[in-house]
Amino acid sequence: MSYLASTRCKLYYEDTAESDLSARDKPAVLFVNGWAISSRYWKPLVGMLSANYRCITYDQSGTGQTIIKGYKPTFTIRGFTDEAAELIEHLGLQRSRKLHIVGHSMGGMVATELCLRYCNALLSATIIACGIFEETPYTSLGLFFLGGLIDVSLNFRNIFQIEPLKSIFIKRAASKEISLEYHDILIDDFTQSDKDATIAVGKFSIDRDSLRAYTRHVLSISSPMLCSVGMADHTIPPEGTISLYERRKAESEAPTHLAKFMEVGHLPMLEETAEFASELTKHFEFAEQFYKSKP
């Protein structure tokens, strides 16, 4: 558990190499969080991966234990990318090809930018539940109304601390049962996140120009990519991630794989931790062999 005094914030992060010095020689995995959530939801997955990987989690500006008081961070994709980049360089992860980057939901957009910025260090990219959709008048109208709902919902978010709204919130996020500990963590993170950051992130996640750039940049990543999706996701329609996979598969020469979890929602790292860890491990091992085989 450490803090990095970055140009944007006092960034809270956890690095398994702090308690296990041998982890410094292992391939590293950087986990990039989704919307209005701290890094705590990665803990069960980190527990399963840390024997073979150096795992780094962190709280983005506006969430968790990261401190933004006294700073003026911009809540944009570029800003969040710069923030994570400072952590990558602080830990020296840009120095050799030993880095796997995993982005969940909105974090997939930030992870994509990091993958391009650190392409010479990157072993693999993983995108979880962060897809693309065909642009139609119907989807454009839907995104417009969703942007308005983000403003409204943030003014009343404390109601999700009360039953039955608490259970409704959790069931929308997770289609399978998760532990009560993580019920409380998810609610606490959402209701305590910085309001300005949460609104900004919610809106750029559905901004048409941001989504177009995201699509272009996903196609540009030259390392192996895993697209992962819960087919019972009620937060972000799973068809978007499948479309992203199909687009990259058709247009990119880099290896691309798809992991579908049939009865899982938006949180595979909590709903099917062991199965998800297995899929990630297979992807990481494939990527490592991919680079060993290159001249």
Image (tube, helix red, strand yellow):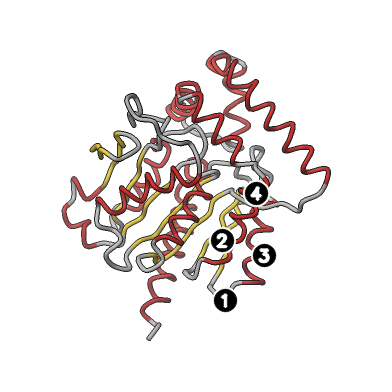
Residue located farthest toward the front when viewing the structure as drawn: 72
Element under label 1?
loop
Q: What is the spatial separation of the Cα atoms under label 2 and label 1, in whole angstroms?
A: 12 Å
Residue at the (49%, 68%) spot, across then down? 224
| Label 2, label 4: how far apart the Cα atoms are | 14 Å
| Residue 220 placement: quadrant | bottom right
**Mark 3 / mark 1, whichever is N-terminal:** 3
Give the amino acid type for the residue marked by disc 2 in the picture: Val
Secondary element type, mark 3:
helix
Q: Mark 2 touching mark 1, by CB under 8 A? A: no
Q: Amino acid at mark 3?
A: Arg
Question: Which amino acid type is marked by label 1?
Answer: Glu
- The structure residue drawn at horizontal position 29% and vertical position 58%, both measured from the top left corner, is 93
Mark 1 Cα shell of 10 Å, populated few (<14), some (14-19), many (≥20) = some
Mark 3, residue position? 247
Height in image: 225 above or below 236?
below
Read off the residue under disc 4.
Answer: 209
The residue singled out by tag 2 in the image is 218
Which residue bears the numbered disc 1? 253
Q: Residue at x 76, y 37 (%)?
A: 142
Would you identify the image quadrant in which residue 154 lies? top right
Marks 2 and 3, how far apart at CA: 10 Å
